[in-house]
Amino acid sequence: DTAVSQTPKYLVTQMGNDKSIKCEQNLGHDTMYWYKQDSKKFLKIMFSYNNKELIINETVPNRFSPKSPDKAHLNLHINSLELGDSAVYFCASSHAYRTDTQYFGPGTRLTVL
Amino acid sequence: GEDVEQSLFLSVREGDSSVINCTYTDSSSTYLYWYKQEPGAGLQLLTYIFSNMDMKQDQRLTVLLNKKDKHLSLRIADTQTGDSAIYFCAESNNNDMRFGAGTRLTVKP
């Protein structure tokens, strides 16, 4: 059974387009996250979402917006895609906010042409 | 910036013990993790340790943490062919989570 799933696995799109990446967790967790993996394999946190409280990393451009239709889903919407947005994006979830172990999805490789 | 390093490859024979090592630089790390990634799959959490612990054992897995040297290791006892995968070390503080590049473990029959 998949605990944290993301779709699509791969996404190739043109610069300037708007795209969404979906994330679902079936672990009953209260907190979900989005990370961007940089070229050195480091994961930089973009958003944390816990009980309708959104914590945004201030370095994230406002073209990125998370949308949570319910506790089990946190989708990432990106407007006006730029070349520098090309990366692997990971969704994760945990019971408690930041103090608990996070379980990761398989990642979505986004390529902007 | 902060860094997490691990050796890229490890090869062992089935039944032997495997030891995967990791070093990190962030002195404010609160949690340290080991994740396993099988081909085509996502990251699977294997085990984690709080930064104020020295050791944690979970069945065939033993995690050792030397906080002074910022060294983390994962020992897999009685390694099986099903243990062949990439193992990622990771550390987190209150802001970020950083992963190493992964160690590819190959278990030979």
Image (cartoon, coloured by chain):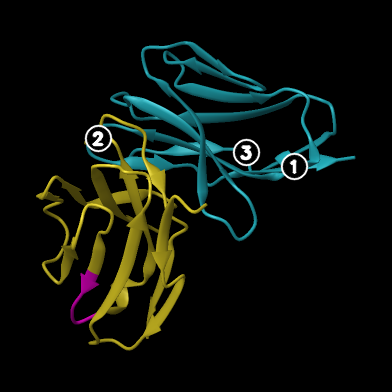
Badges 2 and 1: C-beta atoms under 8 Å apart?
Answer: no
| Front position among marks 3 and 1 | 1
- Residue B82 numbered mark, or none: 1
* Frontmost residue, B45 versus B51: B45
CA separation in Å, label 2 and label 1: 31 Å
* Frontmost residue, A79 versus A83: A79
The correct choice, above or below, for A9 with respect to B102 in the image is below
Q: What residue sits right under mark 3 in the picture?
A: B7
Element at label 3: loop
Q: What colour has chain A? A: yellow
Residue type, label 3? Ser
Residue in view at x 34 percent, y 58 percent:
A24
Element at label 1: helix
Chain displayed in cyan? B
Q: Is residue B89 left or right of residue B15?
A: left
Residue type, label 1? Gly
Badges 3 and 1: C-beta atoms under 8 Å apart?
Answer: no
On-image quarter of the C terminus of chain B:
top right
Q: Position of residue A16 (x, y in %)?
A: 23, 87
